[in-house]
C-alpha cells in the first residue's frame, strides 16, 4: 500500500487531512527531540539535573581558567591550559555525561519499541540511526565546545595575541568535534548492546575510563623499559589516547604519552584511520542492532 492511499490518525483517532512532510523533516524532528532529550529538555525536572550539572562543571572550570590570567594582569601572556588539553583534563565529566545520556537515547526504543514522536509517514532505519548518532555527537560537542568558547572570549578580553588564540581555538574545536563523533558512536553501541540502562551506564564508563587507565599504565611500563615504539602503538587501544595522539600529531597539542613520545605524522595517520574505522564500525553496529530489533 502506498503512502498516498494510507490513512493516518492523530491521538484523538480523527483522520489527519494535513500535509505529509518528507523523510528529511522526520530526521530533523528525531534529531531535535534526541538532542533536547540529552539535556533533559522536554522531560521531567529530575532528568535535567545531571546533564545540566555536568555542563555547569565544564563551564565553571573554563571560567576559573580564564580568571587566572585576568587576575594576574600583565604577568601572563597565554592561558594556563591549552585549548586541546581541556577535554583531556575533563575526561571524567565527559564520560559521565555520555554514560548517562547514551542509554537514555537508545535503550527505551530498543527495549519497548516506542518513540515519543508521531510520524505521518514511515522512516527508514538509516534515518533513525543517523538522527540518533548526530544528536548524541552534537550533545557532546556542545558540552566540550562551550568551555573552549569561554576560554577564547576570555583570552581576547585579556588582550592575548589574537592570531595565536584563534589558531588554538580552531584546533581545539577540531579536536572536540572528532572526540564527540567517536565517543558518541562508542557510547551508543555500548548502550544498544546492553539489555538494561544500568548496564549501559557501567559499560560506557568502563570502556572509556578503564581502557585509558590500562593503556596509560602499559605505556608507562614501555617507557620505563625504553621501548618508545610500543608507546605509540599502545595508544591505539583507548578512545581517549586515540584523540590525544591525533591532536598531538596534527593539531599542535602537547602529547600526554609518557616521555613525550607522541606519534609522528606517519603514525598519526594510522591514528586517524583507526578513529574513522571506529566511527564507521559504530554506525554499522547500530544499523545491525536496530535491524535485529525489527526497527
Image (tube, rainbow, N blue to C red):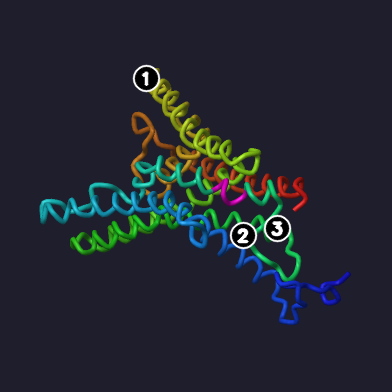
Q: Which mark is residue 224?
A: 1
**For the residue carrying disc 3, how many other residues have a C-alpha within 10 Å: few (<14), some (14-19), or many (20+)?**
some
* In-front residue for pair 194/180: 194
How far apart marks 2 and 1 lie (CA) works out to 46 Å
* In-front residue for pair 6/277: 6
The image quadrant that residue 245 belongs to is top left
Write the residue at 39% across / 20% down.
226
Secondary element under disc 1, as helix, strand or loop, is: helix
* In-front residue for pair 11/38: 11
Asked if labels 3 and 1 touch by Cβ distance under 8 angstroms, the answer is no
The vertical placement of 100 against 136, above or below, is above
**For the residue carrying disc 1, how many other residues have a C-alpha within 10 Å: few (<14), some (14-19), or many (20+)?**
few
In the picture of the structure, the residue carrying the numbered disc 2 is 131
Figure quadrant of the N terminus? bottom right
In the picture of the structure, the residue carrying the numbered disc 3 is 126
Write the residue at 48% across / 33% down.
235
Q: Position of residue 250 (x, y in %)?
A: 42, 48
* Residue extending furthest toward the front: 12
The vertical placement of 171 against 265, above or below, is below
How far apart marks 3 and 2 lie (CA) works out to 8 Å
252 drawn magenta:
no
Asked if labels 1 and 2 touch by Cβ distance under 8 angstroms, the answer is no
Question: What range of the chain is rendered magenta?
Answer: 102-106
Q: Main secondary structure of the magenta part?
A: helix
The vertical placement of 187 against 33, above or below, is above
Amino acid at each position: 500500500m502506498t503512502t498516498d492511499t494510507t490513512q493516518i490518525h492523530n491521538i484523538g483517532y480523527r483522520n489527519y487531512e494535513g500535509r505529509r512532510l518528507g523523510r528529511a523533516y522526520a530526521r530533523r524532528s528525531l534529531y531535535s527531540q534526541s538532542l533536547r532529550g540529552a539535556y533533559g529538555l522536554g522531560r521531567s525536572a529530575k532528568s535535567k539535573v545531571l546533564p545540566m550539572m555536568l555542563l555547569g562543571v565544564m563551564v565553571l572550570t573554563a571560567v576559573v581558567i580564564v580568571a587566572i590570567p585576568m587576575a594576574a594582569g600583565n604577568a601572563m601572556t597565554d592561558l594556563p591550559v591549552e585549548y586541546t588539553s581541556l577535554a583531556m583534563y575533563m575526561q571524567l565529566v565527559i564520560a559521565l555525561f555520555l554514560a548517562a545520556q547514551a542509554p537514555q537515547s537508545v535503550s527505551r526504543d530498543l527495549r519497548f519499541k516506542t518513540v515519543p514522536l508521531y510520524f505521518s509517514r514511515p522512516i527508514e532505519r538509516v534515518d533513525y540511526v543517523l538522527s540518533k548518532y548526530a544528536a548524541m555527537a552534537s550533545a557532546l560537542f556542545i558540552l566540550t565546545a562551550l568551555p573552549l568558547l569561554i576560554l577564547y572570549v576570555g583570552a581576547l578580553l585579556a588582550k592575548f595575541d589574537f592570531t595565536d588564540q584563534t589558531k588554538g581555538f580552531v584546533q581545539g574545536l577540531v579536536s572536540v568535534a572528532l572526540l564527540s563523533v567517536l565517543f558518541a558512536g562508542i557510547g551508543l553501541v555500548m548502550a544498544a548492546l546492553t539489555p538494561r540502562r544500568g548496564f549501559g551506564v557501567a559499560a560506557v564508563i568502563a570502556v572509556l575510563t578503564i581502557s585509558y587507565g590500562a593503556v596509560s599504565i602499559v605505556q608507562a611500563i614501555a617507557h620505563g623499559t625504553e621501548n618508545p615504539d610500543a608507546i605509540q602503538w599502545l595508544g591505539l587501544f583507548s578512545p581517549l589516547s586515540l584523540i590525544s595522539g591525533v591532536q598531538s600529531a596534527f593539531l599542535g597539542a602537547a602529547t600526554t604519552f609518557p616521555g613525550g613520545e607522541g606519534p609522528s605524522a606517519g603514525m598519526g595517520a594510522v591514528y586517524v584511520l583507526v578513529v574513522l574505522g571506529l566511527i564507521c564500525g559504530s554506525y554499522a553496529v547500530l544499523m545491525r542492532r536496530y535491524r535485529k530489533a525489527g526497527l
